[in-house]
Image: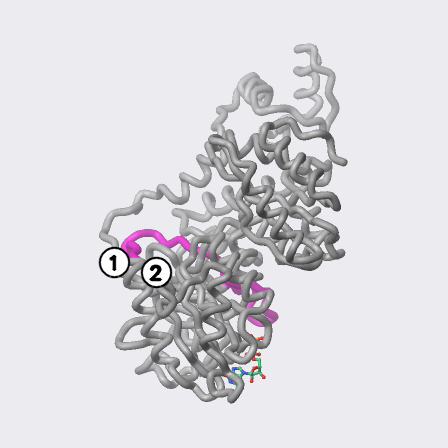
Amino acid sequence: LSQRMAERSVDVIKYLMKEGQMMKPGDVIDADLAELIAGEFGHTVKRVSESDVELGIFGADKGDEGELKPRPPVVTIMGHVDHGKTSLLDAIRNANVVSGEAGGITQHIGAYQVEKNGQLITFIDTPGHAAFTAMRARGAQATDIAILVVAADDAVMPQTIESINHAKAAEVPIIVAINKIDKPTADAQKVRTDLLQHEVFVESMGGEVLDVEVSALKQLNLDKLLDAILLQAELLDLKANPDRTAEGVVIEAKLDRGRGSVATVLVQAGTLTPGEILVAGDQWGRVRALVNDRGEQVKSAGPAFPVEILGLQGTPQAGDRFAVVENEGRAREIAEYRQRLARDKAAARQSGSRGSLEQMMTQLQDTGSQEFPLLVKGDVQGSIEAIAGAIEKLGTDEVRARIIHSGAGAITESDISLAEASGAAIIGFNVRANKQARDAAERDGVEIRYYNIIYDLVDDVKAAMSGMLSPER
Ligand code: GDP
């Protein structure tokens, strides 16, 4: 504080002593005292809260003038390992490069666009639910539609189920791509019936989920898949205002030897142009150039348009939000504020202020939420079903537990990120978390509770619901 006021710290400490506060340099004071001191030393105080900072960005002058216009859908591909996610992304890209610009060489920038019947579709180029949920955990929802790839010779597998639950937790609609139908052992019907058990009802089973039989290898029916995406997009009525200052989300970011910090962003509203100043997470910069997914420099990027940004001072993280601000000073101020906030949060975590089931419940009640999200992992399917049944019966009028994902096997990093993104606690029944998962839980402040007797578990959940949970066992 004395530094910011350009005063000697001894003078500040003397003043505090006079007021009966014994302090030394480095001690922490609260905002009220800081305001008092600053006033005493003849400085004008401007209080900046998180909401001021965020409003300052998103409520910028050029706000929401202009009208909403249709924008391309943003699609993520998910599914079990080896079911063909990467092959499908490649096949779609190779078959449908945006026409008229055939010269460019495809670059992996984290997202790409294809054209179908004059309409654009944006694909996130990192398949799988891990990246998807990691982004969501940072508060960013980039995806409009999830393509669930299921190999027709293998049907529904554990990561298929995870993907379904991750998509559902994010309330993102699913389109099923039944892949590898070229294989003699392919059984598309088994995929459809398997999916019933996980509450994915495709059209031919009386549901509303679109499904398409494809072969990424033989490039079969890729057009039909794109049609299904456009149909789903039409139902979603996706719109954004291109005529405002740009904001959106960081898809990927890296430090490039030749080019410095490079971030791929997806513009979600407004239009981004070179020369503009933006804040991305706790980093900022002036846009030196915008580069598209074919390595070409572009003059602007509108809604759902993925571009690489050159000119950032540092490297933001995937999932960070970005926004254009009016000037460099403002950009610096926000970036520094967020860096400080991140440091404070890290310090708070270090000091072990992890949420308990009980605190989570209280928080939920404070926010008026009535659902208590839980993720249940167990040793065998039978016990998981018993637990799920017992927990779901516990609901009261005010609050009920909702199981957002369950499965057999150890608690993994993917479980942690889903729990973090959904504000859920994790319950392990006769299973443990692996090392990476424990570290991630520690880092992200996700609560894991272990049980081996269903009774204890039900008791704890019940107690948490009534806000009377016993101390950690
Ligand atoms: P990912 O792990 O989901 O990204 O799966 P990959 O795209 O890496 O594909 C796994 C394997 O399945 C590779 O050997 C692919 O060649 C193969 N594969 C992918 N799609 C098809 C397909 O449509 N038909 C056949 N026969 N094989 C496929």
Ligand 1's quadrant: bottom right
Residue 96 percent across, percent down from the top left:
37, 81
Residue found at the very far left of the displayed protein: 67
Q: Is residue 247 magenta?
A: yes
Say what amino acid the circle numbered 1 marks. Lys
Say what amino acid the circle numbered 2 marks. Pro
Does the residue at mark 1 contact the one at mark 2 (Cβ under 8 Å)? yes
The Cα–Cα distance between marks 1 and 2, rounded to whole angstroms, is 9 Å
For label 1, the residue is 69
Residue 418 percent across, percent down from the top left:
57, 53
Tell me, for residue 94, which label it has, or none: none
For label 2, the residue is 303
Q: Horizontal placement of 428 versus 62: left or right? A: right
The residue positioned 74% from the left and 57% from the top of the image is 434
**Can the viewer see residue 313?**
no
Give the magenta range. Answer: 238-263
For label 2, count other residues whose C-alpha is less than 10 Å away and answer few (under 14), some (14-19) or many (20+).
many
Q: Is residue 55 magenta?
A: no
Q: How many marks?
A: 2
The residue positioned 37% from the left and 68% from the top of the image is 210
The C terminus lies in which quarter of the figure?
top right
Q: Is residue 284 above or below residue 21?
A: below
Mark 1 or mark 2: whose residue is earlier in sequence: 1
Q: Is residue 62 above or below residue 95?
A: above
